[in-house]
Image (cartoon, grey):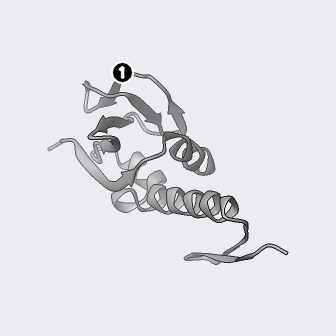
Amino acid sequence: MSHISKIELEVKDIGILGQACTRLGLELLKNKKSFRWYGKEAASDHAITVPGANYEIGVVKKDGLYELNCDYYDRNLEKIIGSQGGLLKQAYAVIKTRVEARRKGYSVLEQRTENSIKLHVRLST
């Protein structure tokens, strides 16, 4: 059975979400007022398209934050964004950390392994 699920991610900055999408090869469609799921459309403020998936991720502003909604019935969607949106969450966290660290005068070195991403943050000299 198909239904809309919420990706547990607190999104405060739509620009950082857009960068996270780009990092994963997704596209944030700003001001798209609906998103596709199981042959239907649901209301949204923005939508994220996922290459190879028939469904989209809805981005809905709620209480000053953005909520991400999707239908995992489309298995291609989960392959790209990870189980329960894990890869999208990771990309958002990496971008957010980089932006905040640089804003505070730190440099950031990213190190990828097969299963993880490590960020080394240090004061710029």
Q: Position of residue 36 (x, y in %)?
A: 33, 28
Q: Is residue 12 above or below residue 46?
A: below
Q: Position of residue 74 (x, y in %)?
A: 33, 43
Q: Dot 1, crowdedness within 10 Å: few (<14), some or many (≥20)? A: some
Q: Residue at x 59, y 57 (%)?
A: 95
User: Can residue 25 be seen from the camera position used here?
Assistant: no
Q: Which residue is mark 1?
A: 33
Quarter of the image with the C terminus is bottom right
Q: Residue at x 31, y 42 (%)?
A: 70
Instruction: Name which quarter of the figure residue 118 lies in.
Output: bottom right
Instruction: Name which quarter of the figure residue 58 lies in.
Output: top left
In this rendering, the count of numbered labels is: 1
Q: Position of residue 32 (x, y in %)?
A: 42, 22
Q: Position of residue 3 (x, y in %)?
A: 18, 41
Q: Residue at x 52, y 39 (%)?
A: 51
State left or right for residue 52 relative to residue 37.
Answer: right
- Return the residue found at the far right: 125
State left or right for residue 4 relative to residue 26.
Answer: left
Q: Foreground: 57 or 121?
A: 121
Quarter of the image with the N terminus is top left
Label 1: which secondary element = loop
**Three-letter amino acid code of the residue under disc 1:** Lys
User: Can residue 8 be seen from the camera position used here?
Assistant: yes
Q: Residue at x 80, y 73 (%)?
A: 124
Q: Foreground: 44 or 99?
A: 99
State left or right for residue 39 relative to residue 19.
Answer: left
